[in-house]
Image: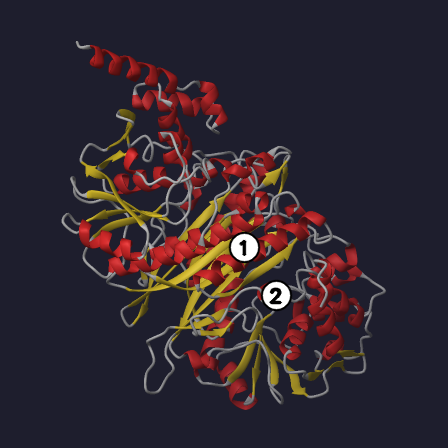
Amino acid sequence: MDTQSQLLKINKNEYLAQQKSKLEDALEMGLTKDEYNLICKKINKTPNMTELGIFSAMFSEHCSYKSSKKWLKTLPTAASHVIQGPGENAGVIDIGDNLAAVFKIESHNHPSFLEPYQGSATGVGGILRDVFTMGARPIALMNALRFGAPDQPLTKHLVSGVVKGIGGYGNCIGIPTVGGETNFDKSYDGNILVNAMAVGLAKKDRIFYSAATGAGNPVIYVGAKTGRDGIHGATMASAEFTENSTQKRPTVQVGDPFTGKLLLEACLELMNTDAVLSIQDMGAAGLTSSSVEMASKGSLGMKLNLDLVPTREDKMTSYEIMLSESQERMLMILKPGSEEKAKSIFDKWDLDFSIIGEVTNTRRLVLTKDGFDACDIPLAPLVDDAPEYNKPYEIKTNKKVLKPSDLKTNLTIADILNIIFKNPNIASKKWIWEQYDSSVMGDTIFANGDSDASVVKIHGTEKKESYGKGLAITTDCTPRYVKSDPIIGGMQAVCEAARNIASSGAKPLAITNNLNFGNPDKINVMGEIVGSITGISKAASFLGTPIVSGNVSLYNETNGKSILPTPVIGMIGAMEEVENALEISAKLDNVLIILGQNDNFESGWVGCSIYQEIINKKYDGAPPSINLEDEKKVIEILLKLNKQKLLTAAHDISDGGLLTTVCEMLFKNNLGLDINLPSNLTNCDSYNPLLQSWCFGEDQARIIIATKDIKKVQLTLNKNNVDFFVLGKTNSTSNLNLKNISTISLNELRNSNEKTIPTMMGNKQ
């Protein structure tokens, strides 16, 4: 053996010796002792540091769903209109006319707490890539945000940063942010939630998938260069916070919406050719998850030369390159011979394009770096043999049913309404959504609270007799209900989302969910997870709204204190004629009618309500019960009435109860209403608990509609045996008048409602 060969052998031996991992390394990366031993057994060797890093990312809760996988399998995912369910970058459903809606929601909770602007911005960028990776052009963004107590200085900092980050990315990339929800609770003081949702449109016969095809086919890296930002981001998202968590800031990715826009356009342009065989976003765990998932789904292998990966920092190791979560990157497998055509497109858009390897038939991931094998492991242990735990759980439910008489108070109805509209969870979020561009692209019909669900027109579906199809989008969850009873809370989240979609004039079609919980090793938290999924499954099955995509975010707690269980439901629906979309705001001389409630009033549900929080300073008791038959009935009759063009507005009754809903319907057009009361309440005073429970109870399966043709509406309701109660006709007084009981100025309520959040955030209006 010559001297050069001996030196190469020595260098390689030294390299491998330095890279060999130990149990301590595995524990530091978030793996358990048992998982480390399993890895060594499955690959029949001690992994080197790069191999261990790859395993730690793929075995992380964020990538493997090891604590929730068992229960996610119980969700309904199939229907005649489902083209692609869970398992791809996003879900896909058929909406007719050879069109598909592509959508998904994902969390970026931990990064947004550590670095609110970049954390939320990259959350938006990541979810957009999930959608256009499927071949869809994004048309709308939503978000579901949860922050701590609004009087905390940290909360103000986090709200400001997150909102700016969402607006900064969405506004720059030119996709409208059309709605969402922002709520506050002290349980989120140490762990906020930032869930981002995106919706796109594609031809249903031009959907792109991630499974690798064809041994020998080239593997292409496209987009931005790889840096050291985001390393072990997936692992960080799979652990709870401590006092030292701020030291993890280097794991937060940095987003670039301008590069994101270039990548979007370049990918869609290439997808219009026949070059792309498969494609995967480099999201959580970056090049690791994208390469492993593509090869595994195709039952193939992959060999990559990491020296060919475009990097923006010097001397990056194989470990760093594989675990980096730098943004705006994609991995593609191209049809052989199309490389030059593809490169010319990415050159035009000034993006990196590099052939970094090839598909193999070995079912192994082989990586080379600096002339050495940096990784050589079988794929099966990374994916097929990843841990799936059946963790112990206990579903705790609060069975205490509160009666109105349990909540006696010296507050009048007017006093309570004033307090409700200053509640940060009811207060107008105008200060927040004004920072988002909701009208870019020109297809937004209703956004940011104009309707119960945001509505966008489907461009290009116009017909001679119609402006074309529309999509309705909403995100919903009531965490206090889930905490009280996870099964009912999960059901309620689905039902409220479906009511909101229907109240906008659309038929509910499908769900993407973001399941946000604390530490699954705690028996009660695991019970919240199991219970919520059970409730979601039951309601989604009954209402015909399958779950086609989603995300699980666990370990959302700090120093052992968990967030409220927050299984967010993102739902979309469709309407054939977008001009039939319904807004919240009633018009002058409209008659308001409650669907799902009649004159035979016994008592309203006050337990676990905002009204109860005002009286008792806490949420207590069981949440309102859910009757799926009633939910389906009220949705179907609303859609039938709207199809007959009998409605001018609709608004479902949820947080704050009936009177809160009525006020919200009257605010925009400065209207008033003389409210009819059930016959057994006409002689009550403003302090009466039963009357207050009618005004503020949070009973489900109810929607208030507005109409100009009460006779035809009543005829249809009676014919279909639907309970209803006529509240009265709108007037121009701007007062809410409960006959001989109370007269309330709606202008004063609206003004305080709109000033609450800016005041809390320290902004002058």
Residue 159 seen in render: yes
Q: Which quadrant, please, contains the C terminus?
A: bottom right
Q: Which mark is residue 654?
A: 2
Separation of residues labelled 2 and 1 (CA atoms): 29 Å
Q: Residues within 10 Å of mark 2 (few under 14, many from 20)?
A: many
Is 446 situated left or right of 343 in this image? right
Of callouts 2 and 1, the N-terminal one: 1
- At horizontal 49% and vertical 76% (from top left) the residue drawn is 638
Q: Residues within 10 Å of mark 1 (few under 14, many from 20)?
A: many
Regarding mark 1 in the picture, which secondary structure is present there? helix
Residue 208 seen in render: no
Is 365 situated left or right of 107 in this image? left
Coordinates of residue 735 in the picture (x, y in percent): 74, 82
Coordinates of residue 132 in the picture (x, y in percent): 35, 57
Is 398 situated left or right of 709 in this image? right
Residue that numbered label 1 is attached to: 165
Measured along the vertical axis of the image, is residue 728 above or below residue 506? below
Q: Nearer the viewer, residue 497 or 540?
A: 497
Regarding mark 2 in the picture, which secondary structure is present there? loop
Q: Nearer the viewer, residue 735 or 224?
A: 224
